[in-house]
Amino acid sequence: MTADTLARQTCKDLARMAKQRGVPGWHGMRKDQLIQALMKAARKKATARRNGQAAAQAANRRRIDAPGEIVRNGDGGPQVKQSARRVAEQLRQLQAASIRLRDLATGSDEPETRVAVKKDRLTVMVRDPYWLHAHWELARPTVERARAALGQEWHTAKPVLRLYEVSELSATMPESETMVRHIEIHGGVNNWYIDVPDPPKSYRMEIGYRAASGRFYSLARSNTVQTPRPGSSDAIDRNWSDLAENVDRIFAMSAGYSSESPNVELQELLEERLRRPISAPLVGRFSAGVEGLLGRDHAFYFDLDAELLIFGATEPGARVTVHGEPVKLRPDGTFTMRFSLPNCRQVIPATASSADGLEQRTVVLAVERNTKTMEPLIREANEA
């Protein structure tokens, strides 16, 4: 409302406007007096509105919000403020997730069902010429000792597997080893697959914590294993996940029957898992190590096997485990894993956790294989 706008109105219209706005004495005013009275009333109303908004804003600034309360701003619209309690809860969840990822103690996520660890150990087995499988059991006091020893560096320390390449043993030269690389792992699991190049080679591993300064605190050392020559994996890698059927092959590939340094820890681990001793009669059959696995007891044989290919996708940066094994994601968040398919029914859970640790999703895959071996048909020599 301006003076020019009001001047274009008729005296009758101005009188009506003045009456509506409560201008006193409007009925006896001339046109110019009505214009001045309406302008004065408009300025007074605008000043009152500005004063009311300023007072409301000052009251909102002084107000301490209760958790989840909705505060009204000066215009009357809702303005939701995140409470300090909610922020503290999110920080607590992030801190708890960070602690879980760093905790290597066996069964640390389920204290009520945790199995007591008899002794700390790291055991390495050979999967094929290019893959090793590490399994560890660490007690709670062992992790606490690492935390105390690292002091302030504990806050930057990450759990890792340290891979060593071991030189060939000889009568004149003692064993030597060279550190190859560090493999970052996380808590909540007790095994990890490690890719290794250029077989055949010998390897050993250590598990521990590595601080940002490069300082390494070792928790356990593994046995020494030797990968086989390329091309032999098809004859060796049968039903890898079905440990009960292939324990003797795995034990032989991992230098378990070596006469120079028998792998006692690996034997103990396998016997604990199978709840039976490893069969002694097979020692002679596998005593030659990996090369002994390539021989056959008879001239003719026929083997048939199957594998399960699992693929999926999630957000880049998420953490994924399939059947308890960590999965390495591609840059776009996709992944692929190959599992052996034993002759039974198996349930494979897959879990994905968001990068911030606040959301987790689980998918359970159930598959079953039923393979039947028919009786062999033996023909007489004259029939052939």
Image (spheres, rainbow, N blue to C red):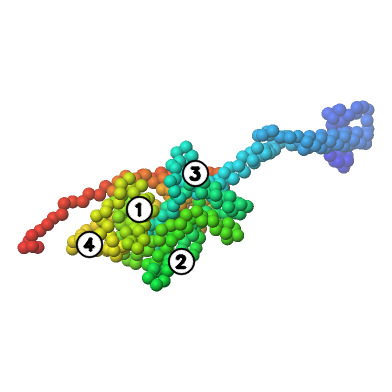
Number of residues whose C-alpha sits closer than 10 Å to that of mark 2, classed few (under 14), some (14–19) or many (20 or more): some
Provide the residue designation for mark 1: 267
Residue type pointed to by label 4: Arg
Which mark is first along the chain, 3 or 4?
A: 3
**Callout 1: SS:** helix
Which mark is first along the chain, 1 or 3?
A: 3
Provide the residue designation for mark 4: 296
**Callout 4: SS:** loop
The CA span between labels 4 and 1 is 25 Å
Can you tell which mark lies on residue 144? none
Provide the residue designation for mark 3: 108
In this rendering, would 129 be left or right of 53? left
Is residue 307 among what the camera can see? no
Which mark is first along the chain, 1 or 4?
A: 1
Which mark is first along the chain, 3 or 2?
A: 3
Q: Are marks 2 and 3 in contact (CB under 8 Å)?
A: no
Residue type pointed to by label 1: Gln
Residue type pointed to by label 2: Glu
Q: Quadrant of residue 29?
A: top right
Residue lying at 48% horizontally and 47% vertically, measured from the top left:
139
Which mark is first along the chain, 1 or 2?
A: 2
Provide the residue designation for mark 2: 177
Residue type pointed to by label 3: Ser
